[in-house]
Amino acid sequence: MKKVYCIGELLIDFVAENQGKDLTQAVQFTKKAGGAPANVACAISKLGGSAVFVGAVGQDAFGQFLVDTLHLHGVDTSEAQRNQNFTTLAFVSIAADGERDFVFSRGADKTLTYQSSLGKQLNQVIVHFGAATSFLGGSLEEAYGRYLSDAKQGGSTICFDPNFRTDLWKNNEETFVTKCHPYIAVADLCKFSHEEALLLSGKNDLPEACAYLHQLGCPVICVTLGAEGTWVSTPTRAVLVASVPAQAVDTTGAGDAFIGCLLQQLAETTAPKETLHQEEQLLKMVAKANQAGAFTTQKFGAIAALPTQADLSNY
């Protein structure tokens, strides 16, 4: 089984449940561990995989809570950095239909520094670049790019999820697109939302968007479409893999559960890069990943809602 390295933010989600999508109306918040790369690491670990989290939190009570949470779920936190900055916070509102709104207060996540000893580990493994905050400056952005280079040179399987957040890129979406393109160019697998695929391609049609993104360099693209399922695109074929029914109460972490489940399955193969090009096997893996994503929407919170193998077997 190959290790999966998940690089990016680990933060506190203060979640307003069933109080509408407008954060100005929320009065009660619940503290939860969050951050897309951390969610993916937990998803992999809960399914029996081997996940390593790479990111930075503060040397405060919130940072300790986050590291303890990942450790509790079996994630290797030996590469997590602690410093004097406050732990990053996100305030999340959840409407009745499960849709979300975010406001971020950035802290320690942006201070992740590059470690050459870690870069040497990114050899013939799987590396997931799924941070929402990675292109916002700070030493995180530099480390992110250097680890991408290490992973490419080490022959690792590279997965990229841009995790676009409107609140973080208001009136500056072109910069976000420009910074994403080099990652798409070298990734073996990209996971996008429908909104992200259109934004990053500048197209208005999903097949055209995928064709453009393939031209940038990525051979396998998964576009998650919520209850519809996942659009799986390669340069020669495109298929909609249907989802499974779910009574969604919170879509937080559904995409992370999806990509975590897909990466966990790839990590169990001897040659993940080659497996991505075995289309029938890939589609079966995506169908299972759809299950994981749907299962997660039925509970509040991201990490607590992630499934185990037993959960998926019984779903």
Image: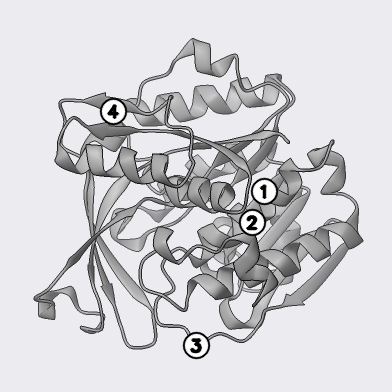
Picture disc at residue 264: 1
Question: In this image, 205 relative to 45: left or right?
Answer: right
Please, what secondary structure does the residue beneath circle 4 have? helix
Q: Residues within 10 Å of mark 1 (few under 14, many from 20)?
A: many
* CA distance for labels 4 and 3: 38 Å
- Closer to the camera: disc 1 or disc 4? 1
73 shown above or below 236: above
- The answer to whether marks 1 and 2 mark residues whose Cβ atoms lie closer than 8 Å is yes
Q: Amino acid at mark 1?
A: Gln
Say whether disc 3 or disc 2 marks the residue closer to the N-terminus: 3
Mark seen at residue 247: 3
- x then y, percent, for residue 129: 54, 40
Residue for badge 2: 261
Relative to 126, 240 lies left or right: right
Name the residue located 42 percent from the left edge and 18 percent from the top edge: 114
Q: What's the distance in space between the residues labelled 1 and 2, CA to CA?
A: 5 Å
Identify the secondary structure beneath mark 2: helix
Q: Residues within 10 Å of mark 3 (few under 14, many from 20)?
A: few
Callout 4: few (<14), some (14-19), or many (20+) C-alpha neighbours within 10 Å?
Answer: many
The residue type indicated by label 4 comes to: Thr
Whichever of callouts 4 and 3 sits on the residue coming sooner in the sequence is 4
Mark 1 or mark 4: whose residue is earlier in sequence: 4
Camera-side residue of 226 and 249: 249
Q: Quadrant of the N terminus?
A: top right
